[in-house]
Image: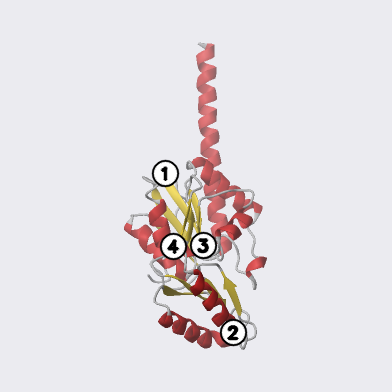
């Protein structure tokens, strides 16, 4: 879709909420360890979960362990490593693994290859590998060629480009598949899905949400399959806060009406 997408409405009703993290809920930093969620964002997510029977999940390229650390003390359903890891609402984990010999061989190959590209960084995720070049953008073409060569040697792998990163992950996993799995389970089942993301890795999620007649929201510029757009992480925060404030006002109105009804009943 073109860049002239509208800002999403302040949503009300029966929704299932899915959020990417880096570049969506949190600003992208030079190094992944510098990323954090503000207390305001955590509070808004907590309120969303309370008002939607827990139908809030984080869907990210990060590992589930990292997501738990960033969201602490909150504990959400998660899809980590683009869906290779998934924890459902009941705490059951679902994991797609690569053979251990493949993991060890790949780690050695990639470590050796990146050693001659200063500033590039290998992030090993167990069942996937991320090749970061944010600190050395001059190596983008070499990183892409390296990743394409690895995928050519290992047909069980798929290549996933992102913002200053290329990931090697197991075939058949995506954020879209993770969202589709959540939508078949309580408390997500029967709700209208909402997915907010910023990167190429999120397009599979937008596609699935669109197929389910949900709300897909792209953060930042660029071509996308999403139906709506928020310009920045700050705009995501403002949009979430507005939704949270509206829910609190609705709750207060219900409480006031109930208290008024009870007062009237007592007077009668």
Q: Distance of mark 1 from mark 2, alpha carbons?
A: 45 Å
Tag 1 and tag 3, C-beta contact below 8 Å: no
Q: Earlier in the sequence, mark 1 or mark 4?
A: 4
Name the residue beneath numbered marker 4: 175
Tag 4 and tag 3, C-beta contact below 8 Å: no
Q: Is residue 58 above or below residue 123?
A: above
Q: Residue at x 41, y 44 (%)?
A: 186
- The answer to whether residue 79 is left or right of residue 34 is left
Most distant residue in the right direction: 34
Q: Distance of mark 2 from mark 4, alpha carbons?
A: 30 Å
Q: Distance of mark 1 from mark 3, alpha carbons?
A: 20 Å
Q: Residue at x 61, y 87 (%)?
A: 117
Name the residue beneath numbered marker 3: 60
Q: Earlier in the sequence, mark 1 or mark 3?
A: 3
Residue 33, position as x, y percentages in the image: 66, 66
Q: Distance of mark 4 from mark 3, alpha carbons?
A: 7 Å
Tag 2 and tag 4, C-beta contact below 8 Å: no
Q: Earlier in the sequence, mark 3 or mark 2?
A: 3
Indicate which disc residue 112 carries: 2
CA neighbours of label 4 inside 10 A, class few (<14), some (14 to 19), many (20+)? many
Label 3 residue SS: loop
Indicate which disc residue 143 carries: none
Q: Earlier in the sequence, mark 4 or mark 3?
A: 3
Residue toward you, 27 or 164: 164
């Amino acid at each position: 879709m073109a860049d002239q997408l509208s800002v999403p409405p302040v949503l009300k009703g029966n929704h299932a909420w899915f959020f990417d993290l880096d570049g969506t809920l949190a600003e992208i930093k030079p190094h992944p360890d510098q990323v954090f969620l503000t207390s305001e964002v955590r509070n808004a997510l907590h309120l969303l979960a309370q008002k939607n029977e827990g139908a809030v999940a984080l869907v990210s390229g990060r590992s589930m362990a990292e997501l738990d650390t960033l969201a602490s003390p909150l504990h959400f359903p998660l899809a980590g490593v683009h869906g290779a890891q998934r924890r459902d609402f009941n705490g059951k984990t679902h994991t797609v693994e690569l053979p251990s010999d493949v993991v060890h061989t790949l780690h050695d190959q990639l470590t050796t290859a990146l050693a001659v590209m200063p500033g590039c960084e290998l992030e090993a995720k167990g069942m996937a590998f991320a090749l970061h070049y944010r600190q050395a953008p001059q190596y983008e073409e070499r990183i892409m060629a390296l990743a394409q060569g690895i995928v050519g040697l290992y047909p069980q792998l798929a290549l996933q480009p992102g913002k200053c990163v290329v990931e090697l992950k197991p075939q058949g996993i995506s954020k879209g598949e993770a969202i589709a799995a959540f939508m078949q389970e309580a408390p997500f089942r029967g709700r209208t899905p909402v997915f907010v993301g910023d990167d190429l890795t999120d397009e599979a999620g937008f596609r699935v949400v669109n197929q389910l007649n949900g709300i897909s929201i792209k953060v930042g510029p660029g071509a996308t399959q999403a139906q709506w757009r928020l310009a920045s992480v700050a705009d995501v925060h403002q949009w979430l806060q507005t939704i949270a404030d509206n829910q609190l006002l609705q709750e207060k109105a219900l409480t006031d009406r109930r208290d008024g009804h009870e007062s009237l009943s007592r007077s009668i």
